[in-house]
Amino acid sequence: MASDLDLSFTLVALAPFIAALMAPYIFRFLKEYSSWALAIIPAAIFIFLLSFLPEIAEHKTVSAGFAWITALGVDLNFYLDGLSLTFGLLISGIGTFIVLYSGAYLKGHAHQGRFFAFILMFMGSMLGLVMADNLIALFTFWELTSITSFLLIGFDHSREASRRAAIQALVVTGGGGLSLLAGFALLNLITQHWNMTDMFAFAPALKQSEFYLPVLLFVLGGAFAKSAQFPLHFWLPNAMEAPTPVSAYLHSATMVKAGVYLLARMAPILGGTELWSTILPIFGGITLLWGATFALKQTDLKQMLAQTTVASLGLMVMLIGIFNEAAIIGVVLYLLAHAFYKGAMFMIAGGVDHSAGTRDITMLGGLARKMPVTFIATILAAAGMAGFPLTVAFLAKEEIYGALVETDVLTLFSQPQNLIAALVILVGNALMMAVGLAVLIKVFLGRQKPTAEHAHENSFSFWVGPAVLGILAVLAGVMTAFMGHNFVAPVASHIINQEVEAHLHLGFDIVTKPAFVLSLLTWVLGTLVFLVIDRIRVDLASLVERANISFDKIFDWLMFGLVRLSDAITRFLHHGRLEIYLTLVFLMFAAVFFGPLFLMQVDWQPLQMPQLHFYEWSTIAIAVAGLAAVLAARTRLQAIVSLGIQGFSVAILFLLYGAPDLSFTQFMVETLSVVILALVMTRLHLDQADIRGVSDRMRDGSVAFISGLGVTALMLLVLQGNLDMRLTDLFAATSVALAHGHNIVNVILVDYRGLDTLGEISVVMTAGIAILALIRIRSGGRQTGIGALKPEPRKAPK
Amino acid sequence: MLEQVLAALVGIFFAASIYLILSKAIIRMLLGVTILGNGVNLLIFTLGRVSREVPPIVSNGELQPAAGFANPLPQALILTAIVIGFAMFTFLLVLGYRAYQELDADNTDTMRVAEPKDAPRPPLSY
């Protein structure tokens, strides 16, 4: 039964794919206006999802979908709760602006239609991912996001750096996907369900299960790869090779958060254990510090932002690991804050690049007057990055610090774990704030650098996204009650699996809270770091240069090692020597014959002296003699004629044992074979005798002997059994009665197995055509020898 | 005991054909393929059980063949196999003939167009 709801939910995930198919054609007709047409899709999805907000805010959930592979319990079913709705709104909402932005950013690009197709496909995959209830559906969409990410990073495929980044992202996130699949399969084995909603009931038992550890590790492997957690983080900064809209959309606002989403989604099933609260904060914390530190080293705006994205992802993973109410409320707020300000920041970076012609922060300065609207958007975004009051990031920061400090900052010193966590978060936040300030102040204020001379404010499509996101970041920070009721509470309730009411508020009493001290410290430290950021950058850069090792190099080393390994294996197996291939084949052949004899308990019946007539013995002897003559033949002609001897003996055997039809055919074919062979082969100047040496002959002889013995032994074994004569009896009984034929063999060929005979005729015809072609290639007069068929030498990639 | 003797003969056919196929000369391999075809046909024939002299043909006016008739089913299969084997043989023959003309060799060791000895290494770049 498909209701409207089932259809519309499925359409949310599928509509972008349909739009993707049409995008190139739409682009052909509408040119620069196509982004406006295509933006309708995500906008419509956004509005559709928004209509569920009141329902979701009451902690209700909506399920819909279709049966997919019923026999395996795999359905294409969707599930909307606070978590998926929040993500769905982010994906479709930011997606709308990204589509508009792409239209302006890639203006005049020949393959803009293709780009739209990719980005819409990604959007559909991502929407499917966050709404899927079934793990198989989730996995499918998960891998689709990896693939579309690959296509988008490698969009500018003429550059090697692009191709490398694309492959790197695919290998890391795709590999993570395989790990995830293993985890899902284990979950299914334990719970017998594929739907996550059905798994929640199994959570207590699962956490006791001995499979809990592998399940957790596999799932974390997938989530960490996707969300760029240390040590799998290195692909994300490289992914900045993609066009800026992609960086803003996939690699900051949405796709990289899929890992965080999965952790949040799985938290009721897997979360809250000792292990969970140990692994997640450790990896998240390292990722946070690593990303924040490396952000300071960069000069490229996009690289700076990418590294802080790594840091932010680390922070979110850390918070999900800490797993208390305040931490989870913090992570929900931070998720929104980050999507707003980081999405905006990337679009701003792209806008600056487009206008000033560079993204290098050391070459930029004083753009504020030239790009006033972008400047204002940047102020809003940087305020979010720094977590200043009135932004949603401020609320997030307060909750995060509040998660660690209960009554007094001094209590931290009695809880070493919380102290370390607080320090890590404080430093990480401060460094990210310094980066935010650098983008704002170094780029837009100060002396005008030469690059600023020709700078100009970009078109509407360039700044509408960042401006709206910046305003949203502030609105969300001010409308605390609305946010708390509609977004934070439903999402947090799901993650920690109990009713949470988020009492967010913004008042001056906030300064009296213990966590506010940490906020103040963050701002002080952030400002200090910003003041010396140029020196830190130079020092870090030289430090990294001296280290002379990086994850990138290790990745290259692994990839090239893999290529070399497969090359070595290929060369080992495909050595190009036919007789070794064949020897292996026949040894396997012999093994297959002898295997059953050894594996089965065989009761051999005693062999009796056969009662054969003299003419039977002599025919068999002639056959053997013919074979021997072929083997011993000194010349070609001798061998060919001897071949005829064994063939005619077989024909006589057929005749003796009641098969006249076979006998006639065999006589004919044998005669033809010998004649044709003699005609063709005597025209060639071939080696006369066997060219093999003695040792080769011994080896080949033994292989041949063993194989022959195996065939005979197996046949003897089979002959001991009973033959099923039902088919034969049927043919014999019905040949005249039904088919009106007296020669049963002929009746079988043309009636009972007529299609077989048709197949046989087709084979003969195909062989004939192939032979004709082989001969015609030559007589055509063109130079078409096999030498000319060699493939073109492979061109070195540009 | 007729079948056991034929089984031994089939083994000899197989051994001879494999020995020929393993030789590096194209023409010997071709002879080996032909013999292998005969060996397989005999194998099917033998495993369908063998009886002397009564062909699976129904006499005029009768509805069933005479008692002790030969098994027609393997015969039908072999008849198909002989024809296909012949088609295969002629194709291989022409293929070998053309290969000799183009490459001027009937020794498989020297025929390395498909898997050249100095095949280029895969590129170590993206």
Image (spheres, coloured by chain):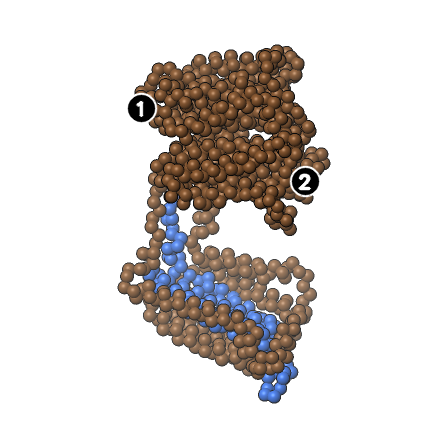
Chain colours: A brown, B blue
Q: Quadrant of residue A349?
A: top left
Q: Please report contact status of discs 1 and 2: CB closer than 8 Å, yes or no.
A: no
Q: Which residue is mark 1?
A: A454
Disc number for residue A422: none
Helix, strand or loop at label 2? It is helix
Examine the rendering and report whether any part of residue A288 can be seen: no
Q: Residue at x 53, y 58 (%)?
A: A587
Spatial separation of the CA atoms under disc 1 and disc 2: 60 Å
Is residue A584 something that shows in the picture? yes
Q: Position of residue A181 (x, y in %)?
A: 59, 41
Q: Position of residue A217 (x, y in %)?
A: 61, 34
Residue at (37, 37) in percent of width and height: A32
- Name the residue that disc number 2 marks: A198
Please state the chain letter of the residue tagged with numbered disc 1 in the rendered image. A
Q: Which amino acid lies under the numbered mark 2 shown in the image of this protein?
A: Asp
Q: How many tags in the picture?
A: 2
Q: Check the image and report above or below for A379 versus A78.
A: above
Q: Residues within 10 Å of mark 2 (few under 14, many from 20)?
A: few
1 vs 2, front mark: 1
Q: Earlier in the sequence, mark 1 or mark 2?
A: 2
